[in-house]
Image: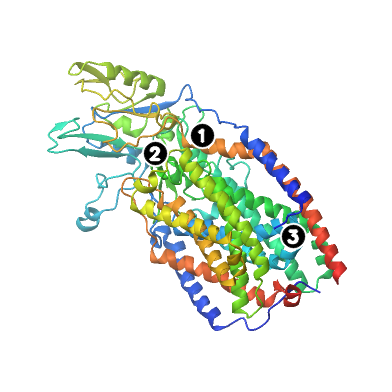
Amino acid sequence: MSIDRRDFFKVISAGAITAATASSVFAREKKNLAPDAVGILYDATLCIGCKLCEVGCKEYNDMPTEQTSLVDDLNVPMIWDNGDDLTSKTMNKIKLYRNGDASVKDRATNGYAFIKRACMHCVDPDCVSACPVTALDKDPITGVVTYDAKACIGCRYCQVACPFNVPKFEWDDPFPKIVKCQMCDHVQESGGMPGCCYYCPTGASLYGRVEDLMAEAHKRIELAEGSKYDYQVKSLDNDETAQRTVQKYVNYVYGEKETGGTQYMILSAVPFHDLGLPNLPDKSAAGKSETLQHTIYKGLIAPGALLAGLLVAAYRGSKSHHESEEGRS
Amino acid sequence: MSENKALGGKIFTKPFIILAILAGIAGILLIKRFIFGLGAVTNLSDGYPWGMWIVYDVLVGTALGCGGYVLAILVYIFNKGKYHPLVRPAVLTSVFGYTLAGFSIFVDVGRYWQLYNIFLPWHVNLNSIMFEVAFCVATYVLVLWIEISPAFLEKFNKTKALGFMNKILFIFIAIGVLLPTMHQSTLGTLMVIAGNKLSGLWQTGWLPLLFLISSIMMGYAIVVFESLYSSIGFKRPFETPILGKLGKLMAWLGLIFIAVRFGDLIWRGQLGLIFTDGWANSTMFIIENLLFIVPMVMLFSEKNRKSTKSLFLIAVAILLAGAVYRFDAFLVGFDPGQGWHYWPSASELLITIGIVAIEIMAYLAFIKWLPILPNIKHTTS
């Protein structure tokens, strides 16, 4: 088909501006950890699977119990210990890894281990980037990823975005919310610590500044297997310790690099992938998505130029159309 | 002298009543959804938070609604006046495609009573791909109703208002081209943040371009489909020569799509995934791409472009191609892990069918009532 050369040129030049802006790639800067960001170090070798952290989580956040056949059939109230994954009623979950005869703790073959799952509080959270109405937000000081139901429209893009599948949605509620761990933000405000860390009897969940926790994690990895070590309990500011025999750690802190780093970090003797933690790149998907979007829409230059071109073309186009129509009639 | 004419005739025909029954069923299920929550009618889960409604009603539905957009490009931007008679029916399909996509979003989001937060500056997150999509789609729905308003003004003989509208309409035509260019591409960008959860066969930084090209192709295909369908259905003369010319454009767009699609797979070294990514992904990838390639090859032959039957089949294939591509990129290729899986529930399907029924009913009623379809004298001259 023959398209008038001048008109074609008009549109192509608008398109060229778009392409030119798009090619000057504007890579979004990597997000850095806030200096006083707080987090949790979970040491799977210390976890005894007692699930007191789950009790603490429910109590601190006033969360309902899971509704299961035990509650329905036997009328046993207050069952907190059931379900096998995070749900819209459970923001913190201890899961069991089991292999072969499961005879020895913290061993990959013929062994078992525990793993605590909750929000990872990413340094560069995909959910925060995804949320259209800033219902999910990252506290600039503590780095906690918070949720505000008053802003949320329930689009569930955060669920699509989260590489850990953490945000949960209240599917059976006509007025649903997104539910996820907010590191007991409301308790931290008054100087307290997250419920899971406060309740943990062994120090498997340890609260503190992320930088300090990371240093502690690397120190533990360097400890000699079989030696004794006084593990701190509840928080790094706490003098309370519990002496335990050091296990052979995997030489890696999960969360140091994953998706740009997380404020919930994990140590384990069993490979992380076996515990169900995903292998993730060092950079967040949010960085890619925002780079792409802001490259195309940088300063709204490209859409603006396109609109200007379109206005001129549409004005001429509709004018000549009406003239030709009037000429005919 | 007018280009478009109301078709007239009875609105409450037998097909119309059947469609109304389907819409009624959906209505009852919607009441259930609003009383008991999304879990009561859908198979959606925390692993698959988006399903049939988002992928069909919103993604495919708005791409099917691209007819008005692509014809506006041709008629007003490239000044191809001969396509003008096709504009109004295409804009009308766009009006309903987009309005009902908007309605589907209202049904799908959990906290619909707070949807207006999207427009409140202190809530808006400019980094969010969803914000761009939501804002653009909502605005475009408004623009489309403005674009179709001359049909109402003609119907009610508001000559003065019509004259004014025709003077300023070019502004809305320009915006009406800009907005779909923006959101049809951004709909693809939505999945970039899903990262590893989306198979390497679909996950790419070129998603926006691929979504944009395929939406334009679907826009042209729907124009061809509709024109031929209403020619048969309402015993009107075929507009094959004009449609054949559109065909060549579609062929080139198809070629660009396939070049970008495979070029990207090769560049990323993911071509091998076609055979190693599980049977569902492999099968769907092959079906999807055959649906793009076969019609494209056919459209390069002049014989096919002159045949009404071939054009019809090609248009259907392109519509399917775009639809399958969208299902693949959002559902088939999406795997959140942890054993999650998704298949739409009967209620979900019935609600989607009901919404499509409303679209068709509204279209049928409007073309009979308002000057929408090309005036036959004009098109045959």
The dot on residue B287 is none
Observer-side mark, 2 or 3, equals 3
B288, A326: nearer the viewer: B288
Residue B85 shows in this picture: yes
On what subunit does the disc labeled 1 rest?
Answer: A
In the image, B132: left or right of A304?
left
Quadrant position of the N terminus of chain B in the picture: bottom right
The dot on residue A181 is 2
B224, B169: nearer the viewer: B224
How far is the residue under mark 1 from the one under mark 3? 42 Å
Q: Amino acid at mark 3?
A: Lys
Can you give x and y, in whole percent of width and height, for residue B62 in the image?
57, 58
The dot on residue A287 is 1
* Residue A172 versus residue A187 in the image, above or below: below
Q: Secondary structure at mark 3?
A: loop
Tell me what residue is drawn at x 32 percent, y 19 percent.
A218
* Residue B8 versus residue B261 in the image, above or below: below
How far is the residue under mark 2 from the one under mark 3? 57 Å
In the image, A43: left or right of B73?
left
* Residue A29 versus residue B228 in the image, above or below: above
Can you give x and y, in whole percent of width and height, for residue A189 in the image?
45, 30
Observer-side mark, 1 or 2, equals 1
Q: Earlier in the sequence, mark 1 or mark 2?
A: 2
